[in-house]
């Protein structure tokens, strides 16, 4: 992509956020490249195939849908939704799987491989790995009882990955609200996007991710902190898992926000969304009105899926998500 079109792209995202109408024509042509019926003639069963495989995978392991949702997020936040996260390290390619936030943490690659293999059988060389992540994330959310949205499709896959970019652009659990807000600037500065997207309502975190919060922070319920300290000592047990939403770990709901209101967020970054600042009223709203959370989450996921997709002749459709063709 040329520097100029990159710039135009960035402007388009800014515009969406601010709802400036001036550039709307330009933005429409850019976003028209992704469409929800992109595969309807070239691979009519694509959506069904992904959905079936997601259901199968979650039945085998309840957590795997959460892991796939996170893959889409970590994919999109590093130079756009181009499937680069899925590339394995080689002697010439330092991949993103081993970036700080991902190493020993991201998972779900076998499910992606399996979906890809099925799609290659049905329609060889048609459905991108980047789109698989976008569809899988939506289907996982729906499976857990969350909102449905029409996934925009037509992304193509990158030929490269960038580990150092992953180290820069994936937000960290030590972040406070201002850090989180600037991390989300590529998607949108609006608070509802930050809060809606950060809803850790399903899945797990390792002791190493929440240790500073349960030992050093004061904005945490003390009994809650104590109980977590039992399995997550000051040192050791780094990989012991705890649910991000202690009430309903496999249910996509607004319990996460209710937890925040009683200071039972698992990560430092989670509790930042309700910590006596401008985010509080929104967190309260989501805690009380699950429908509002669902609506904003779905909208924000579409926005996230629009980050710098490769389209047209850019990139390729990988046959194996782990390596360029
Ligand atoms: C707000 C910024 C965010 C931060 C700082 C953050 C941080 C984290 C951390 C530290 C973990 C635990 C990883 C581990 O210990 O292995 C985690 C897990 C997870 N995150 Fe986030 N995250 C953020 C936003 C998001 C977003 C936007 C999504 C999806 C839309 C998401 C979905 C998930 C899911 C589903 C898990 C559980 C994965 C599993 O169980 O395998 N996170 N996140
Ligand atoms: C990833 O984790 C493994 C195992 O803990 C470690 O040996 C390796 O150095 C880590 N890779 C990077 C790039 O940090
Ligand atoms: C990778 O990302 C880093 C950090 O954003 C950037 O400085 C570097 O230029 C990127 N490398 C390539 C080859 O794009
Ligand atoms: C945010 O965190 C940084 C350190 O990462 C700290 O310097 C700053 O004071 C914090 N800001 C707020 C508002 O807590
Ligand atoms: C986090 O935000 C603080 C200001 O609140 C800033 O000083 C610090 O550099 C930021 N850290 C990161 C990693 O963005
Ligand atoms: C708590 O903070 C102290 C002082 O900054 C630091 O030395 C220690 O490593 C922190 N502990 C945890 C578990 O993060």
Image (cartoon, grey):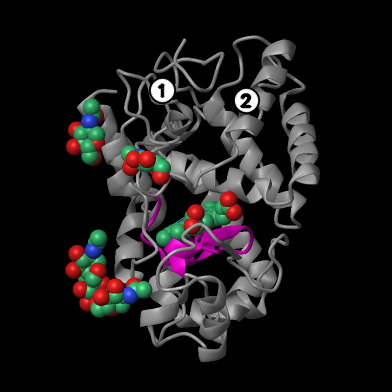
| Residue 47 rendering spot, x and y as whole percentages | 73, 30
The answer to whether residue 149 shows anywhere in this view is no
Mark 1, secondary structure of its residue:
loop
| Residue 77 rendering spot, x and y as whole percentages | 40, 44
Q: Can you tell me which quadrant of the image ligand 5 is in?
A: bottom left
Magenta stretch in the rendered image: 187-210
The answer to whether residue 244 shows anywhere in this view is yes
Residue at horizontal 36 percent and vertical 53 percent from the top: 20
Front in this rendered view, residue 244 or 299: 244
* Left or right of residue 265, residue 43 in this image: right
Front in this rendered view, residue 288 or 58: 58
Q: CA distance from mark 1 to mark 2?
A: 16 Å
Check the image and name the residue furthest to the bottom.
Answer: 222
Mark 2, secondary structure of its residue:
helix
Question: Does label 1 or label 2 sit earlier along the sequence?
Answer: 2
- 55 shown above or below 228: above
Q: In which image quadrant can residue 293 be found?
A: bottom right
- Disc 1 target residue: 158
């Amino acid at each position: 992509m040329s520097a100029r079109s990159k710039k135009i792209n960035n402007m388009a995202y800014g515009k969406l956020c601010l709802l400036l109408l001036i550039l709307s024509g330009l933005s429409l042509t850019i976003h028209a490249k992704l469409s929800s019926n992109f595969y309807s003639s070239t691979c009519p069963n694509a959506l069904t195939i992904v959905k079936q495989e997601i259901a199968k995978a979650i039945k085998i392991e309840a957590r795997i849908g959460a892991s796939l949702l996170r893959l889409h997020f970590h994919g999109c936040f590093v130079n756009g939704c181009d499937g680069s996260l899925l590339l394995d390290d080689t002697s010439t390619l330092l991949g993103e799987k081993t970036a700080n936030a991902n190493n020993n943490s991201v998972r779900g690659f076998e499910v992606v491989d399996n979906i890809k293999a099925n799609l290659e059988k049905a329609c060889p060389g048609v459905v991108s790995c980047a789109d698989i992540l976008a569809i899988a994330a939506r289907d996982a959310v729906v499976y857990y009882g969350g909102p449905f949205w029409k996934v925009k499709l037509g992304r193509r896959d990158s030929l490269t990955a960038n580990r150092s970019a992953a180290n820069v652009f994936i937000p960290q659990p030590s972040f406070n609200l201002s850090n989180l807000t600037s991390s989300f600037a590529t998607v949108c500065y609006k608070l509802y996007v930050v809060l809606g997207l950060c809803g850790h309502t399903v899945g797990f975190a390792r002791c190493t991710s929440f240790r500073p919060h349960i030992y050093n922070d004061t904005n945490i319920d003390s009994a809650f902190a104590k109980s977590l300290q039992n399995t997550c000592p000051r040192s050791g047990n780094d990989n012991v898992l705890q649910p991000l939403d202690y009430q309903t770990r496999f249910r996509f709901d607004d319990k996460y926000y209710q937890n925040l209101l009683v200071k039972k967020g698992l990560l430092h970054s989670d509790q930042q969304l309700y910590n006596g600042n401008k985010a509080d009223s929104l967190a309260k709203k989501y805690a009380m009105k699950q429908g509002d959370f669902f609506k904003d989450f779905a909208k924000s996921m579409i926005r996230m899926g629009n980050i710098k997709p490769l389209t047209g002749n850019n990139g390729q459709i990988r046959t194996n998500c782990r390596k360029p063709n």
